[in-house]
Amino acid sequence: MLANDFTIPLLLLIPLISGVLALMIRADIPRRILLLSAASIHFLLTLTSHNAPPAFGGWVVVDALGCIFLLISSTLFLVACIFGIGYLAREKKDEQRVHVDFESNSLFENGPESLLTGCLLFFLTAMTLVCVSNHLGMIWVAIEATTLATAPLIYFHRHRKSLEATWKYLLICSIGIALALFGNFLLTVSTTTVHNQELPLLLDQLIKSAPFFQPMWLKAAFIFLLVGYGTKMGLAPLHTWLPDAHSEAPSFVSALLSGALLNCAFLGILRAQQILIAAGLADFGRELLIGFGLLSMGLAATFILKQMDFKRMLAYSSVEHMGILALGVGLGGSAVFGSLFHAVNHSFAKGMLFMAAGNILTVMHSKSTIKIRGLLHIMPVTSVLWLAGFFAITGSPPFGSFLSEFTILKAALEQGHIIIAIFYALVLSVIFIVMAMIVLRMSFGLPRNTDPIDVHESWSMIAPPLFLGLVTLMLGVYMPPILERLLHEAALQLGGTL
Amino acid sequence: MINDSSIILFFLSLLCAPILLSVINRTKAIFAGRTGQPILQVYFDLIKLMRKGTVYSQTTTWIFRIAPLISLAGVMTTLLLIPWGKIPAPFTFTGDFILVFYLLGIGRFFTVIAALDTGSSFEGMGASREVLFSAFTEPILFATLITLVRLTDEASLTNLFHGITPFLWTTSGAALILVAVIIFVILLTENSRIPVDDPNTHLELTMIHEVMVLDYSGPDFAFILYGASLKLWLFSALLAGIIVPIHTDNVLVDGSIFLLCMLAIAVAVGVVESLMARLRLVLVPRMLVGAGAIAAVCIYLTLK
Amino acid sequence: MIDLIFVLLILTGFVFLGSGRLQFSIRTLAVQGILLGLIPLWGSWEGLWVRMLSITTLSLLIKGFVLPYYLTRAMHKSKVMHEDHPFVGFTTSMVVGIVCLGVSFWLASRLPTLGGTQPQMAVAVSFFNVFVGLFVIMSRRKALTQVLGYLLLENGAYIFGVAFAIEVPLLVELGVLLDVFVAVFVMGIVIFHISKSFDHIDTDQLSSLVG
């Protein structure tokens, strides 16, 4: 099934219509089947979507950059849905509507599962729209749609802390989106120097005419777009919503948020950078990206030091990796390839980690990094996945993230940014040490007397993170030529070299 | 520059100033459904006070005795510099508006230290409030005048008012409206009108201006009262000069337009006094900073 | 004449900074919405009368009536009428506003004016609203005031778009309006949940998730 004229419309319409249907279906089983089938069809379509013909009057295309992020999102969504369905089935199995919040010993309810499923599918639609959109205005609308679609997901477990997290998420991300809107307007004004009228914000047209844009307006536009979308991406100092939202949401939702949503916000910034490169102002954008990247990494390393909650630890790790992504693109050259490759590795590894964390939370009823010991005895398979994920996310060989992070380091040294390279290596080491302490302490040792031993781990708990882990492992050893070609094409779009 | 023909108008303004107070009182009375005081009541009050004897507290010194004289002298002198709308003032020179405000400042200074001179903490409280509010109003007033100077490119009051033409109103109407609003607010503040201060109140904690002059009696108090009416005339004349854009060269027409405008301003003050309540004391700085913000907007508008 | 509207927009921004009464702030926001709806009437819309009319009407309706009505209802439901002790006092906020205004005018002077019919003050006014919106969000405690600050921020961006009569297709403009509508709608729901769950909407006390 090769890419054809219907690929992109189907990519958008299938999750959208499924979402609407999911809101209306009352019974759980048919709804879950609908979710699974929509995710699977979307995934299959994505596999064939590279170089699909543009649709909707040239407003949606799948270029290399969009294709990579689309692949990441779709794969992660499918895997997360499998995990999520198992999770929801287990939650419903106890036949109790009221659950106990482990930390505050208060009671809470879950939101309706139809709302969850519907919003998940709307989320997939919006993410697809971000990846395929050729019009900057539509990217903006799509990213705003992701904010609105994910807010109910974070508030699925309805207790105070998730409410607080949802509020912060909504407010701060909406602020970011409003700033990005302002950036879009500034960008439109900067295009008026060409033929004395405003150009439509279609990316290919913008790239063609970029050298004639008014530079001051273009720079101002980039700043606002960077800050606005950077808020959504989790770049410091606007990342404050991230630890709360990603730790309070259900685990498979956190996996999607960390693994797919942050990438989509990054795509918004990348499109702006493409225009800057075409206009000859690439260095301006690069400096800003390096600055924000280093700041994010530094702040993440600082805040991860005292974490008592392992889901928050994972969230701060996401902030750090977003910093690495920004740094990579900011450095340019071969670091761009490294950054894009790192996006793939990070999404899969983080997804795996969050799912493993979800398993731990379900069994141990605690998010504490201190109280949990001896996971290898309690839940051996999950514990192995937890350990493997830790190695994957911190950049240890033979996982793929080692290669991507090393590429970025090499590029920094080649370009002579010695201090940046030292800082980068330092932050990575600090985070490795801190996470090692936490993860190793949780996995080894003897469990407390009150802990269950050798818990049964169903296949829906194991298979999804295992799959993701194997993919990350494979990417570290063998890069499929298709992926390599795709990554190179995308890197060229962003001014990277081989 | 001295304009001889305007000296007559100067004496006329000295004579007519108390009528503004009467108009304000009559407006408030009409709003309240009363008949109100006769129009010439303020004159009757002044004459009555002049015929009385004075009582001086034993704790006061010569400062207390000369303060009313100095403040009255200051305000009377400023009237030499204030034009009647488009009719030139008796004295005109570059920067004369700065002299106006500093003369007012001298009067205020002496009133304040005379209030402290009585040794009563009550007057001291009024004095500190008065100084606080004037600390807000003076920069705002200067900012307003800077705006006007930049708009009309003239630096003396007479020429400034000459520069306010209908053309200026159409091009910079927004700035001029804001300037007028600010001056009106400052008029209310400097003359102790509602919403800043209630001229009729005799409650201890709510007085500002009244408190400072509580100990005066007889001719001293007459000077204070007359000086207050002159000050009201001064600020109203400032406002009238900005509002009226019409400039005929006929003295009678210009003069009567100006008088009509002054009466309208007095009525407006009366209306504001009737419709609003006094602000809580802590809110007055906020209102003044709001006026300052508007003044800042005006300056930015003229800077572009 | 359009300068008058921009000046009024600046003044409404100052009103936001200086007022602690929520009902009054919501009404000010409604006034701002109506003013925003009127701005397109001065743009150059040769031949695009239908679009201009629809944008004007929709903005007027949504920003001037629907959103304030919804916010007032949220205010009554959560029983919060005043913003009593913001992090930055009201008088100080207004002084900060004056500084922001200066910065906005300076920034606007740095961006070269491009030929065309756009009013010169639009850039400064939009920057000012963006800064004031951000400041209100950061300096106030109540969740409802933060939503108002967010709407101010959006208005700032919108002023810019509308004043420059940007040729962004109708779809995206509708998307913008819809987004504001839905965002505030969702935020209102969350505020209701917050007030039910916490008995207040004091976001300063939503601080159990720290670190």
Image (spheres, helix red, strand yellow):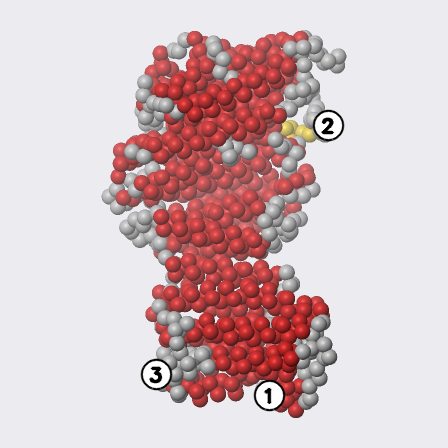
Q: Which of the numbered marks, if any, corresponds to residue B249?
A: 3
Task: Sort mark 2 into few (<14), some (14-19) or many (20+) by Cα contacts within 10 Å.
Answer: few
Where is residue A34 drawn, in percent x and y?
52, 21
Q: Determine the residue positioned at 55% across, 44% down.
A: C138
Q: Which chain carries label 3?
A: B
Q: Quadrant of residue B188?
A: bottom right
Measured Cα–Cα span from mark 1 to mark 2:
80 Å
Q: Residue at x 50, y 49 (%)?
A: C132
Q: Are discs 1 and 2 located on one and the same chain?
A: no
Letter of the chain that mark 2 sits on in the rendering: A
Image spot of residue A422 (x, y percent)? 45, 22
Q: Earlier in the sequence, mark 3 or mark 1?
A: 1
x and y, in percent, of residue A101 in the image: 69, 27
For label 1, the SS is helix
Chain bearing tag 1 is: B
Q: What element carries label 2?
A: loop
Q: What element carries label 3?
A: loop
Question: Which amino acid, mark 1?
Answer: Tyr
**Above or below — where is A280 with respect to A47?**
below
Q: Which one is closest to the eye, mark 1 or mark 2? A: 1
* Residue A105 - label: 2
Check chain identity for marks 2 and 3: say if they share one: no
Q: Can residue A17 be seen in this view?
A: no
* Residue bearing mark 1: B43
Tally of numbered discs: 3
**In this view, the mark in front (2 or 3):** 3
